[in-house]
Image (cartoon, rainbow, N blue to C red):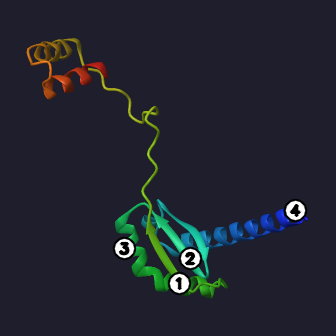
Amino acid sequence: MNHLAAADAFARLSEQANRLQRLQTLLESALPAYLLPGTHVANLKRGKVVIHTDSGAVAVKLRQLAPRLAEGFIQQGQEVTGIEVKVQARRRASANARTKPLKVIGIRPKQALTSLASGLEDDSPVKLALLKLLRNT
């Protein structure tokens, strides 16, 4: 019995994934190119298409377009009762993965910064910042 229930659950999950993919394809064909980056169909709940975007400005525009998008989905045979747009912040890269190369400070500027830091008080925020900068270059 458990295998049958699992198979049924996988079938429903596969069906939902296919629905979302069809909606994503329709969304991509309906939106102008400048609204597509960071925008995707996240879910379909009780006929309502949930769209995530990583930009507040894009979310505002999508909300304005929502009635037209819903009508387009319906015309393409999708059972849609509305559109919900949510802003989802982008995932940040892990702290270990650097996206920018480290900047290198020349010998003379590095010596000047070291000299400046040595003349400051030990608990000075400027000294701590300079020492951190020097460590990271």
Disc 1 vs disc 4: Cβ atoms closer than 8 Å? no
Query: Which secondary structure, mark 1?
Result: strand
Q: Nearer the viewer, residue 110 or 72?
A: 110
How far from the left and from the top, in percent, is residue 134? 25, 19
How far from the left and from the top, in percent, is residue 54? 42, 60
Give how far apart the Cα atoms at labels 1 and 3 are. Answer: 16 Å
Which quadrant would the C terminus be assigned to in this image?
Answer: top left
Classify mark 3: residues with Cα within 10 Å, few (<14), some (14-19) or many (20+).
some
Tag 1: amino acid: Gly
State the residue position of label 3.
60
Mark nearer the viewer, 3 or 4: 4
Q: Is residue 110 above or below residue 29?
A: above
Disc 1 vs disc 3: Cβ atoms closer than 8 Å? no
Tag 4: amino acid: Asn
Classify mark 1: residues with Cα within 10 Å, few (<14), some (14-19) or many (20+).
some
Give how far apart the Cα atoms at labels 2 and 4 are. Answer: 31 Å
Query: Which secondary structure, mark 2?
Result: strand
Q: Nearer the viewer, residue 18 or 2?
A: 2
